[in-house]
Amino acid sequence: MFFLLSRKDNWKKTIPLMINGNYMSWYLENEIDPGDSVGVDEVGRGPLAGPVVAAAVWISENLILELQKNFISLPVRDSKKMTRNQRQKIVAWTKKQSSDSIRYAIASATVEEIDELNILNAALLAMERALHDLEIHERKIILVDGNAAPQIPDTSVKTIIRGDAKVLSIALASVMAKEHRDDYMRELSQKYPYYSWDKNVGYGTAVHLEAIRRYGITPHHRKSFAPIKLRSEIVA
């Protein structure tokens, strides 16, 4: 069983396609049956400001089979390579599904936790929280994007390099986490407009760096990150 995705941003029935010559599968090498896994991904490790956010997504076997039976192609992949409009459509579709079809949870680690733990450990903490909040009590295999994963007692955890381009539940987790974090940064931007977080969502763009130089840092900046750690003044 494979779920193959179209490059086109539409919801029509299509002939299954490959992305960049790669199959996006519901499970890897026949090791994992549909419905027996949870996909996890995080976003926001690189920005100079804001939390790191993770999402965990479970997709039921029945929904998987329904999508495959009808050759429905979802335009989903690594969230950073999707437009905001594409991500919003995926989020809206996901939220419309019943809890018997899809379940997801989103969690974060704060700027203070990032500075205390370092960004990697804070990202793993956000993943742990998302998995805890998912409230799936049956034992599942946890599929995590990248090469680092949280330690979950009595649970099999598998890391997958570029998992958001290979496994649909991970790709959905990437999209859900990114839209959640981006929305949060856009809200913060209303209070701190000089930093243009509505556009850069906390990344170190030229506009953001110039605002830090001119106005100092905010309580939402990561003080363990250069060049933030060289600044001591904080905007109220």
Image (tube, helix red, strand yellow):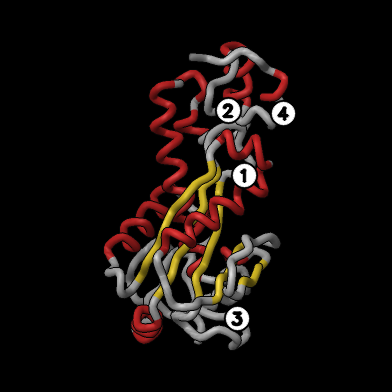
SS at mark 4?
loop
- Nearer the observer, 25 or 100: 100
- Cβ–Cβ below 8 Å for labels 3 and 1? no
Q: Amino acid at mark 3?
A: Leu
Q: Looking at the image, is 128 positioned above or below residue 142?
A: above
Residue 161 in picture, x, y percent from top left: 68, 65
Q: Could you tell me which secondary element the residue under label 3 belongs to?
A: loop
Question: On the image, numbered disc 1 is attached to which residue?
Answer: 45
Bin the neighbour count of mark 2 within 10 Å (Cα to Cα): few under 14, some 14-19, many 20 and up.
many
Q: Quadrant of residue 229?
A: top right
Q: Earlier in the sequence, mark 2 or mark 4?
A: 2
Which of disc 1 and disc 3 is earlier in sequence? 3
Cα–Cα gap, marks 2 and 1: 13 Å
Q: Name the kind of residue labelled 2 in the image.
A: His
- According to the picture, the residue beneath numbered tag 3 turns out to be 28
Q: Are dots 3 and 2 in contact, CB under 8 Å?
A: no
Which residue matches tag 4?
226
Figure check: 203 above or below 229: below
